[in-house]
Image: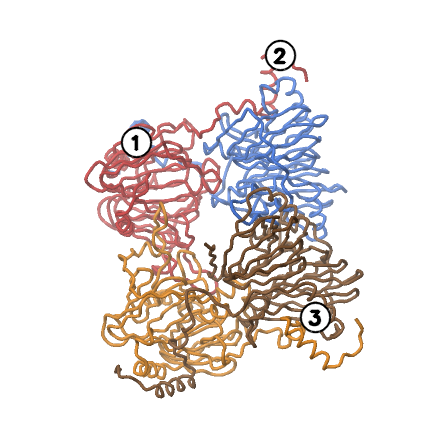
Chain colours: A blue, B brown, C orange, D red
């Protein structure tokens, strides 16, 4: 093992031989790494007015028979050509439109999904046999592996925000999809105190219920109202987490969800973290400063903050600003990769 | 160390010398032990008509100023003279009477307490600053260390069942009592979705709420109704457990509580276990067979089943029989002493 | 319900009627309670020289055939006549003597037991089929429900300290004892890395091993040596806990065990807690101040500190003082009753 | 929203407009999905003779000053051009060569790493200040975020297998690397009973130890020997898991590791699972059948089984075959994606 200088051509030949035999020298791979996580993805905002118009137009261009679900995904502008992304590296965000009388047949998949109803009424989702009505402001869950189908018995369009961890699941080659031609059999309604974990069947196999599948906006706002007079979180102001009361943890294994009030006059401090976030504006307007850029937002807009981008929130209006958000924090932390840094 | 026979008198002298020096030979202590747990306590039923009458009479005999709380405890007939017992070795059961305008000042203690409201309306309990109204059928908690006071703003007497683990705590010399002359400051009502664990404050110190403090009878009956058409538990028929949705466990660290329906025509199988149970009849009538004896019960009656007594439940009427019950099962299991045996 | 004064004789008659019907008015029971836990038990020391001599004498007075196990219990001087106590309200402590060739047949019981070998060599315990040699300084476990028998293949007497939670278990009427005439079948030795949790069988039912059954004094002293140069615990100086590496918790469900070094010249601060402690002097000498009284101790002595007695430890010699101790802290905390207070 | 047929060109124009505005219609993305997870990666074996020769040759071609660590990675033949892979979608495998006197300076990173020493003696790793000697058969851990450096004080080359979850971490854009020019300060050796969780510091901040950092081959073989006479696992024969005795779980948050004996004459059943595996042959020889293809292996070979490939193991020789393996099972299960299927 001499220390003579090796001509570059010999090296190239050697590297080619390695590659041909399925070896890759580590020292050629560690180039771009440093003390900060990096992504090509960038912060971005999708305006509701634009997205809604394109969604409606999509209804003309693509018949539902072809689409099965009329879902317009938000793809991060920094995505590489063949990269599996959504709004962030791990989180999918989309608007979904359902028209009166339409039905999306039952399927289930390994990504976990949530819905936040943006406008309209009369639609419903059936999750593992439980029918859940969908009203504006509702937050619904269809966890990993749960059968779900959508329908619409009302008038006028219903639009909701879809949130999934499908980019995360796809990058690990773990996306599995089962489809059914038939609709699910709908079970009798479950009693509420059963679903929220205050009463439990005490014998035999557990009853058919794992956790609540819907959270009402009014409930979350009531809790926010209860907390609004204190000192808020320096980074998010008055923020409550939707929780799984059965497990005491986040709503799903890989996704956490929040409702937050940025009170009039509040400027939060900036921080960044190794989980990424999708924000959706429920009420009011304001702006965020993300990586030094000011992003104005108003009702219906959706904002992606990929991992490790510094961000703060600001409400200079005289009205409450309410944001719904979801993150991959439970997944990142389950893998031992969670890190947060407050900005100076 | 010879093997010659030792005269009994020498032994007695030696034993006396040991005792005087605070030694006790193990071989003199293991006499009564065998493969089954034993207690001198016995199954017993306290009839509501009798207990209520004595309770009211106590109101005449003992002024509330002297009694502070007008609580008539059920003392197991098998109790030894100076033994700390209640209805069972570990569980206290009592009726408490509150008259309009009366106030029981705030105290707190290491035993955990529950109330089940038997009759009347208009009373309330303040638990660590949270005011909880008390209506017939309500099940209330005042866990270990929580300040609590009672008051009554309505008309007519209010009577409830008190359940505590005070005999357990007393036998371990762990009974600690703090009393206050003043009433507690009453805080604003907590939002329900906060209390049941579906929404959580997401920053700083946790919000002032640990768990639900009241469970409504209608909720428990709704869940029972949902389950009643299936096959019930062989030992308890249709039985649901009141749960702490924050922890996912029993309502308190040492006490579990249940509501059960014994359906018309049902005879359950007998079993026994190393935890003891207090039953209270909420609706209907029936009988239990405890250690081979038939005990008839009807609304308002309270029944003690000490540890390891075989028991089964029977409803030969055409009406539902509803039993509320509580046990020390969480305490027994936390100590690694839980055991259950079905009868042949 | 008038407020006229009731003659005492009427009250007495009423109380007698209540008692006859198995009721006990709460207001007659709360007398002695206050903000501190209380016990009639007192701190006490049993000197090894005395205890050893009585133990040997017991061997003459009581043949082993009668005693089955030659165990001389330490009974707290404050015990009430018929009260189930040991060295403290919850903890039994005793010396046990085994002579060459003797065998204590297999039994198992709901109390959990530990042994700390005080002198001699050549004895062994078989715990659920695992043979464990007993050498001076060894700390052995026979948890709740484990079959155990003792034998002695060596020369000279072997004496060990027995520690159990039998008073706790007895007070709850949960003492269950099973005895066998035959000895256990002894299994092959288990590999050490299996027992300490570093390697686990990965299929089917778990292997026959729950936790380590013996801890060597040299190991504990090595860890103490590793820690001795830092700042010690203000209340116990350099103290290490024997742990169950499988569960990560205390050695048994109800009992925790410790080895501690009180370094020459150290005076610890006083504190008290709602768990009780038995100390045994392994090496050196010193004194403790318990409830204001100075208690001198030296090798082999055993000291009881019942619950809530203030205590501190002092080594004014130039030699290390090593104490083995065990407490009911896991039981007290599992019941939600743990409390500690440092003295001013 | 008419149902007239839309010309394909209009659709293309619409899709282009969507893409330009960072939208992606879901219905164009769900094509390849079905009820099974899929990967382009393939099972593959890297022969030790070839890999070792290339590794030594690399020592000539690339000076260590350039390489920092002489690590020859195994890149799965099914990898797409710019895809972050290793031996599988989530697991990196490589051989690393260290020559006498060489030093690899300290770094730390978010991927977790393990080493299995294949040949040589005299090398060491310093992990967060703890020096760990590396002998043939040793299994070492450098969990996520732990500083580690390597050195070699002996004679002759030392070669080990490196296993990391770096492809998993990279795909989530969570790879963070910190490098140090200086070597770590080496702390005094930790007592073994401290590291394996049998004794714990009982006051103040926890001692500087989280878990064992090295497992000896002899220990694992002793446990295997203890278990070998029973019925083995149908899929892996006699398999033991290296465990973290502090947490009771897998050795690291994202990686589990195993040693398994395929006994002479054993043919295991086939199964598949959603975690992937790297096997390394420690002793003996045999073959696996992976997705229907027979792969012969012998000492030193490394085999990749990507997710959801059916595999079984076979030893038709008269000698024991010992395999070391590691998987991403803890990561896959933490994300709620674990699934296993036995073959018919």
- Percent position of residue C228, x then y: 39, 68
Q: Pick the residue in front: A141 or B6.
A: B6
- Percent position of residue C166, x then y: 44, 70
Callout 1 crowding tier (Cα within 10 Å): few <14, some 14–19, many ≥20: some
Residue topped by disc 3:
B180
Q: Tell me the number on the disc at residue D5.
A: 2
Residue B11 lies in quadrant? bottom left
Q: In which quarter of the image is the N terminus of chain B?
A: bottom left
Q: What element carries label 3?
A: loop
Q: Give the distance between the C-alpha atoms of the residues marked 3 and 2, in whole angstroms.
A: 80 Å
Callout 2 crowding tier (Cα within 10 Å): few <14, some 14–19, many ≥20: few
Q: Looking at the picture, does residue D320 appear above or below residue B287? A: above
Residue D78 lies in quadrant? top left
- Percent position of residue A179, x then y: 52, 27
Does any portion of residue D131 appear in the rendered image? yes
Q: Give the distance between the C-alpha atoms of the residues marked 1 and 3, in whole angstroms.
A: 76 Å
> Viewed as shown, does residue D74 lie left or right of D20?
left
- Residue at the spot 36% in from the left edge and 88% down from the top edge: B9
Residue topped by disc 1:
D289
Q: Which of marks 3 and 2 is in front?
A: 3
Q: Which of marks 2 and 1 is in front?
A: 1
Q: Are marks 1 and 3 on the same chain?
A: no
Q: Give the distance between the C-alpha atoms of the residues marked 2 and 1, in whole angstroms.
A: 51 Å
Q: Give yes or no for contact between labels 2 and 1 (Cβ–Cβ under 8 Å).
A: no
Of label 2 and label 1, which has the lower sequence position?
A: 2
The answer for which chain carries disc 1 is D
> Viewed as shown, does residue A275 lie left or right of A152?
left
The answer for which chain carries disc 3 is B
Q: Pick the residue in front: D51 or B231.
A: B231
- Residue at the spot 67% in from the left edge and 27% down from the top edge: A152
- Percent position of residue A208, x then y: 56, 41
Q: Pick the residue in front: B222 or C47.
A: B222
């Amino acid at each position: 093992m001499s220390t003579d200088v090796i001509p570059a051509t010999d090296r190239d030949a050697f590297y080619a031989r390695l590659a041909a035999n399925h070896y890759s020298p580590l020292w050629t791979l560690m180039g771009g790494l440093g003390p900060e996580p990096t992504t090509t993805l960038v912060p971005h905002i999708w305006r509701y007015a634009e997205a809604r118009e394109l969604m409606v137009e999509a209804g003309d261009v693509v018949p539902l028979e072809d689409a099965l679900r009329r879902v317009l995904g938000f793809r991060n502008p920094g995505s590489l050509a063949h990269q599996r992304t959504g709004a962030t590296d791990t989180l999918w965000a989309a608007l979904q439109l359902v028209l009166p009388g339409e039905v999306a047949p039952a399927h289930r998949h390994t990504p976990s999904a949530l819905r936040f109803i943006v406008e309209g009424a009369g639609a419903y989702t059936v999750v593992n046999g439980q029918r859940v009505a969908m009203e504006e402001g509702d937050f619904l869950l269809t966890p990993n592996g749960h059968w779900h189908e959508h329908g619409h018995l009302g008038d006028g369009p219903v639009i909701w925000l879809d949130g999934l961890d499908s980019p995360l699941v796809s990058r690990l080659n773990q996306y599995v999809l089962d489809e059914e031609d038939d609709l699910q059999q709908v079970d009798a309604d479950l009693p509420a105190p059963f679903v929220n974990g205050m009463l439990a069947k005490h014998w035999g196999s557990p009853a058919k219920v794992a956790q609540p599948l819907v959270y009402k906006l009014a409930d979350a706002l009531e809790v926010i109202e209860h907390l609004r007079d204190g000192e808020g979180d320096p980074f998010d102001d008055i923020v409550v987490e939707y929780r799984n009361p059965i497990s005491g943890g986040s709503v799903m294994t890989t996704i956490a969800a929040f409702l937050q009030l940025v009170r009039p006059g509040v400027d939060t401090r900036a921080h960044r973290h190794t989980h990424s976030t999708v924000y959706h504006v429920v009420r009011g307007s304001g702006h965020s400063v993300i990586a030094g850029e000011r992003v104005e937002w108003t009702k219906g807009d959706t904002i992606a903050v990929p991992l490790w981008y510094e961000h703060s929130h600001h409400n200079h209006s005289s009205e409450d600003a309410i944001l719904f958000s979801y993150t991959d924090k439970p997944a990142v932390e389950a893998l031992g990769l969670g890190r947060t840094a407050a900005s100076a």
